[in-house]
C-alpha cells in the first residue's frame, strides 16, 4: 500500500505526520466538527455516525470529536462568524475537521465575512480538492460513463484576491479587477496535484482491478488560458509543468497534459472519463468543479477538502439549503464522502476506502436515496444504509 506519507509528504506535511504518529501510538484521531448553518447541522452528524461505525482495525482507535462553532447564524447571535476559540481548538487539539455549510447573505452585512474563507486563510488551506465520481455519469452526448476525476483548485489567489476598483471615465464608469498568479502558489498546488495523483494510484491498488474506474497510469491535466493570458496563465502553466519536470518520481510515474479552459469544459461534459487529476487556478477551478457536479446529478453527492501542509478541512460542496433545513431530507453523501477524504488526507487510506465503497454500494443499490436524486429516504436512513454497508 502506498501511504499518503510516502506519496505526498509535501502535500500533507505535519497533518499526515501527526495522524501517523497518533496511529502508531494507538491514539484516536481528534476531528473538529463545525456544522455551521442550515443542513450542515444534519449532514455533519450523519458523517460522524459513519466514522463511528467503522469496523475495528481500520483505525487505531475510535475517533474523538470536538464540537465547534462558526457560521452566519452564529454571527447573528454573537457578532463574529469564526470565533477565535474555534481556530484555537483546531490548531491545538484537532488532527483535521469537517465543515458543514454556511448561509452567507447575498448583500453586504457590516462586520461579516465568510467563516470558510476565514478558515482557508487562517489555516493556509491553499488547495480545494474535489473528487467527481460516478459509475454512470450523464454526459452531454447522452451516454453514461464511469468517471473518477479529482479537481484541484488553487485556493488563495487569481481574481479571488478581491482587489477591484471602480472609476469614472469620459464614457461612463468602468471597473478594474487585479489578478494575481505567483510562482509560490502555483508550485505548491502543482506539487499537491502530482502527489495526489500518486496517492490515488495507491488507493486504487487497494481495490480489485475489476472495481477500478481509472485503470491507466496516473495523469495530471493542467488547465490554463495562456494563449490569451500569456503572462499570468503563462506563469501558472510554466510553474506547474516545472514541478513535473524537476521530479524523477513524477516524470517516471505520472503523465502530464494541458487543456485550455474552454476546451476543458467542453471535453469534461463530452468525455469526463478522459480525466484523472485536473489542476487549475482559483477561478477556473471554481467554475469547472461546480459544473462537474452536473455529471453526477446532485451537489449532495460531491465532497471536497480544503488542504494545506499542516491541516485539512473536509467540506461538502453544497450550501446550507435553508428551504429544506430541519426536515431530515438533506443528502448526507457529500458530507460522508468528505469525511472519507479527510481520513485519506490524514494517511488512513483503508478506512477511507471502506467508506467510499460503502457509499458506492448504497448508490448502486438505489433503494435508499434522498429526494434530490429521486428517492424518498431521509438523511438518517441514508446514513444508516451506509453504516450497514461497512
Image (tube, rainbow, N blue to C red):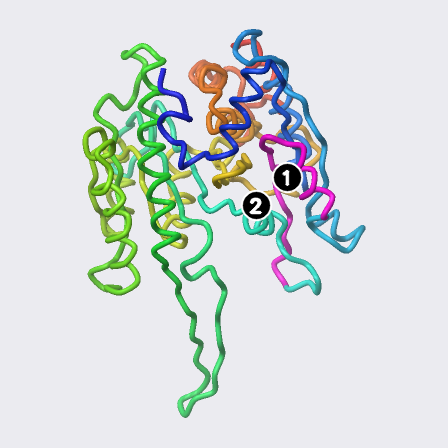
Instruction: Reply above or below: 49 against 178.
Output: above
Q: Secondary structure at mark 2?
A: loop
Q: Which mark is residue 44?
A: none
Q: SS for tag 1?
A: helix
Foreground residue, 318 or 232? 232
Q: Nearer the viewer, residue 206 or 211?
A: 206
Image quadrant assignment for residue 69: top right
Measured as percent of width and height from the top left, residue 228 is found at 23, 64
The CA distance from mark 1 to mark 2 is 8 Å
Does residue 156 appear to the left or right of 195 in the view shown? Answer: right
The foreground one among 318 and 219 is 219
Q: Identify the residue at the far bottom of this view.
A: 170
Horizontal relation, residue 201 to residue 337: left or right: left
What residue range appears in magenta?
Answer: 84-107
**Residue under circle 2?**
123
Compared to 126, does 168 lie above or below?
below
Q: Residue at x 44, y 87 (%)?
A: 172
The reply to whether residue 381 is visible in this rendering is no
- Which residue appears at 55% of the width and 37% of the height? 313
Which residue was labeled with disc 1? 91
Measured as percent of width and height from the top left, residue 285 is found at 38, 48
Asked whether 86 falls inside the magenta stretch, the response is yes
Q: Position of residue 46 (x, y in %)?
A: 63, 24
**13 is within the stretch colored magenta:** no
Residue depicted at 45% across the width and 34% down the height: 12
Q: Are marks 1 and 2 in contact (CB under 8 Å)?
A: yes
Amino acid at each position: 500500500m502506498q501511504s499518503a506519507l510516502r506519496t505526498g509528504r509535501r502535500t500533507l506535511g505535519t497533518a499526515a505526520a501527526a495522524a501517523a504518529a497518533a496511529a502508531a501510538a494507538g491514539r484516536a484521531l481528534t476531528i473538529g466538527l463545525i456544522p455551521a448553518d442550515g443542513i450542515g447541522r444534519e449532514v455533519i452528524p450523519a458523517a460522524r455516525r459513519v466514522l463511528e461505525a467503522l469496523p475495528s482495525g481500520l483505525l487505531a482507535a475510535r475517533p474523538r470529536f470536538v464540537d465547534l462553532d462558526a457560521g452566519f447564524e452564529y454571527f447573528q447571535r454573537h457578532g463574529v462568524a469564526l470565533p477565535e476559540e474555534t481556530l484555537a481548538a483546531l490548531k491545538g487539539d484537532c488532527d483535521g475537521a469537517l465543515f458543514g455549510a454556511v448561509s452567507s447573505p447575498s448583500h453586504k452585512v457590516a462586520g461579516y465575512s465568510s467563516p470558510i474563507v476565514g478558515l482557508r486563510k487562517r489555516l493556509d488551506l491553499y488547495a480545494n480538492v474535489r473528487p467527481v465520481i460516478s459509475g454512470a455519469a450523464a454526459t452531454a452526448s447522452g451516454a453514461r460513463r464511469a468517471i473518477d476525476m479529482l479537481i484541484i483548485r488553487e485556493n488563495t489567489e487569481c481574481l479571488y484576491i478581491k482587489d477591484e476598483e471602480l472609476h469614472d471615465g469620459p464614457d461612463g464608469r468602468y471597473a478594474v479587477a487585479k489578478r494575481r498568479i505567483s510562482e509560490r502558489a502555483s508550485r505548491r498546488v502543482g506539487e499537491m496535484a502530482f502527489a495526489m495523483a500518486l496517492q490515488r494510484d495507491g488507493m486504487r491498488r487497494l481495490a480489485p482491478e475489476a472495481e477500478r474506474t481509472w485503470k491507466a497510469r496516473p495523469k495530471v491535466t493542467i488547465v490554463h488560458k495562456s494563449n490569451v493570458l500569456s503572462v499570468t496563465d503563462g506563469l501558472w502553466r510554466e510553474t506547474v509543468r516545472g514541478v513535473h519536470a524537476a521530479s524523477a518520481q513524477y516524470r517516471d510515474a505520472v503523465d502530464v497534459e494541458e487543456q485550455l479552459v474552454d476546451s476543458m469544459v467542453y471535453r469534461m461534459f463530452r468525455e469526463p472519463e478522459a480525466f484523472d487529476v485536473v489542476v487549475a487556478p482559483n477561478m477556473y477551478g471554481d467554475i469547472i468543479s461546480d459544473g462537474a457536479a452536473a455529471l453526477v446529478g446532485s451537489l449532495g453527492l460531491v465532497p471536497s477538502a480544503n488542504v494545506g501542509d499542516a491541516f485539512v478541512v473536509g467540506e461538502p460542496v453544497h450550501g446550507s439549503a435553508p428551504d429544506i433545513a430541519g426536515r431530515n431530507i438533506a443528502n448526507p453523501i457529500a458530507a460522508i464522502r468528505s469525511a472519507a477524504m479527510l481520513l485519506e488526507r490524514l494517511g488512513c487510506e483503508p478506512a477511507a476506502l471502506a467508506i467510499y465503497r460503502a457509499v458506492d454500494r448504497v448508490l448502486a443499490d438505489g433503494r435508499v436515496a434522498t429526494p434530490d436524486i429521486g428517492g424518498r429516504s431521509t438523511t438518517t436512513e441514508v446514513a444508516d444504509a451506509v453504516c450497514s454497508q461497512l
